[in-house]
Image (spheres, rainbow, N blue to C red):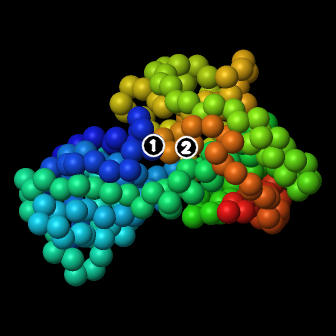
Amino acid sequence: MTTEPLFRDDAYARETTARVVSAGAEGVVLDRTVFYAASGGQPGDTGRILRADGRALAVTDTVKGAEGAILHRLAEGAAPPAPGETVTAVIDWDRRHRLMRMHTAMHLLCSLIPGAAVTGGAIGDGKGRLDFDLPEAPPKEALNEGLAALIAADHPVTTEWITEQELDANPGLVRTLSVKPPRGAGRVRLVRIGAGDPPVDLQPCGGTHVRGTGEIGRITVGKVENKGRQNRRIALALEA
């Protein structure tokens, strides 16, 4: 039932041909897909599944299923394709790209608050938030200036893999308390921002990101809220 996650190696792939493995009320499982399944605070992709006869099925959400399957959820009442059928899976690219820009910006925000654990977060279409374990949040002006500088520098964004044993030996790589890196496969995917040593940011992440920070565009820090004695919520918004 495992679905090959093409987005993991190429976040810019917008469509792919695929074979229907199964289809039912819970969703359509393909043997390969460009659709990101909701996890780590990033929503699942939306888009279309195109059938050979020209009919288009709207995909309203994408989630993880059992045994490595990725479920493409169809609009209510849609007739799913048959197992064995060859289809074309096409993501809503504009929405995905906004999610990629925001997700990368949230990594930059982490880099501006070193040492503080992330206690929660959510990525939305054009907006996002992170909660930090902090007695006081940095000034909003300083965060906006820091983000603008990191975006203007157009740092490269790359991925790499380490073993679970290497992660255990470097626990400081994990910033999030609410979402732990998936384990059991023997290796963990890291997202690296910046070519220097040390990098701008380096942490486990399975999400989709832009290739360089300059692609994020203009972004601003909105509300900075107190959500508890040691919890500071910082909201971000894309300006376009």
Q: Which residue is mark 2?
A: 209
Q: Are marks 2 and 1 in contact (CB under 8 Å)?
A: yes
Q: Secondary structure at mark 1?
A: loop
Q: Which mark is residue 25?
A: none
- Tell me the quarter of the picture where residue 153 sits: top right
- On the rendered structure, is 53 left or right of 10? left
Camera sees residue 66:
no
Camera sees residue 165:
yes
Work out which residue is located at the far front of the displayed protein and give it: 54
Q: Position of residue 139 (x, y in %)?
A: 92, 53
**Does 137 appear above or below 228?**
above
Locate the C terminus by quadrant: bottom right
- On the rendered structure, is 32 left or right of 206? left
Q: Amino acid at mark 1?
A: Ala
Circle 1 residues within 10 Å: few <14, some 14–19, many ≥20: some
Identify the residue at image location x=37%, y=33%: 184
Identify the residue at image location x=70%, y=25%: 199
- On the rendered structure, is 39 left or right of 118? left
Identify the residue at image location x=81%, y=66%: 223
- On the rendered structure, is 104 left or right of 39? right
Q: Position of residue 143 (x, y in %)?
A: 85, 49
> From mark 2 to mark 1, how far is it between C-alphas?
7 Å
**Does 134 appear above or below 224?**
above
Q: Residue 31 or 135: which is nearer the viewer? A: 31
Q: Residue 173 or 127: which is nearer the viewer? A: 127
Q: Which mark is residue 11?
A: 1
Q: Residue 71 or 147: which is nearer the viewer? A: 147
Q: Position of residue 170 (x, y in %)?
A: 62, 22
